[in-house]
Image: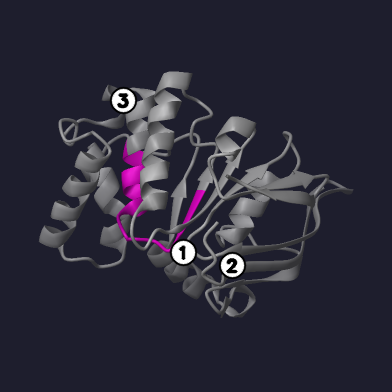
Amino acid sequence: MKTNGIFLKAEGIRKTYRIGKKGIQVLRGVDLEIPRGTWTSLLGASGSGKTTLLNILGTLECPDAGKITCDGVDFGSLSARQASKFRNKRIGFIFQAYHMMPELTILENVMLAAQLNGSAPHDLRRRAESLLEKVGLSDRVKHRPTELSGGEQQRAAIARALINSPDLILADEPTGNLDSKTGSGILEIFQALHQSQNAPTIIMITHNQAVADLGDRTLHLVDGRIADSASGD
């Protein structure tokens, strides 16, 4: 495992959702430390709070209690606008459901996040085309999402997540909707990314132990808490 210092730290993270008068406690005091440049797999049963934790680590949700710092930035000190800016520039999200804009081409979908950050159009187009080539979609840049297979859409989603050269990649079951062969191709992209120079820090939710073992370390989320961790080979 790489040891380049702690990049992301969570302390005492709690989250409860209210349904009428009933409270459902999802996270019950999560503590974790993620070293810079490592790949951490997050395992847990359905309903264990994995996606909620990932959303909180990515500033998409706020915890009820606890503290998160990322590269020295205290998320609790950020306004909504500052959190959005941090998220757009430094975090890349990869979702199980792809979340592509159906009216845009694949190239336009990949470019969109960087356009929101004010990137120069000509530089942005070159970078988007380069990323799509790296994930094997150079012949699909003008296609719309509905014209692509699930595996192709997920590869495009990876390119989109990388367009701003993020420091942190948060992936929620990126192979969950794919067959084993297609899923293996997606994981090969993650492995190449992880082994690249200046590799981003990766946190990946999975329910598959074999997928989890590809990372440097596995964290188990059980009943809203981190139960244990193990280093990968």
Mark 2 or mark 1, which is nearer to you? 2
Name the element at disc 1.
Answer: helix
Q: Position of residue 221 (x, y in %)?
A: 75, 46
Residue in view at x 43 percent, y 28 percent = 184
Callout 3 amino acid = Thr
Residue placed furthest toward the front: 233
Residue in view at x 37 percent, y 27 percent = 151
Dot 1: few (<14), some (14–19), or many (≥20) neighbours within 10 Å? some
Which contiguous range is marked in magenta?
156-170
Callout 2 amino acid = Leu
**Viewer-closest of 104 and 124:** 124
Residue in view at x 72 percent, y 39 percent = 44
Q: Position of residue 122 (x, y in %)?
A: 10, 59
Residue where numbered disc 2 is placed: 8
**Is 73 one of the magenta-colored residues?**
no
> Is 101 located above or below residue 183 in the figure?
below
Residue where numbered disc 3 is placed: 146
Residue where numbered disc 1 is placed: 87
- Give the image quarter of residue 186: top left
Dot 3: few (<14), some (14–19), or many (≥20) neighbours within 10 Å? some
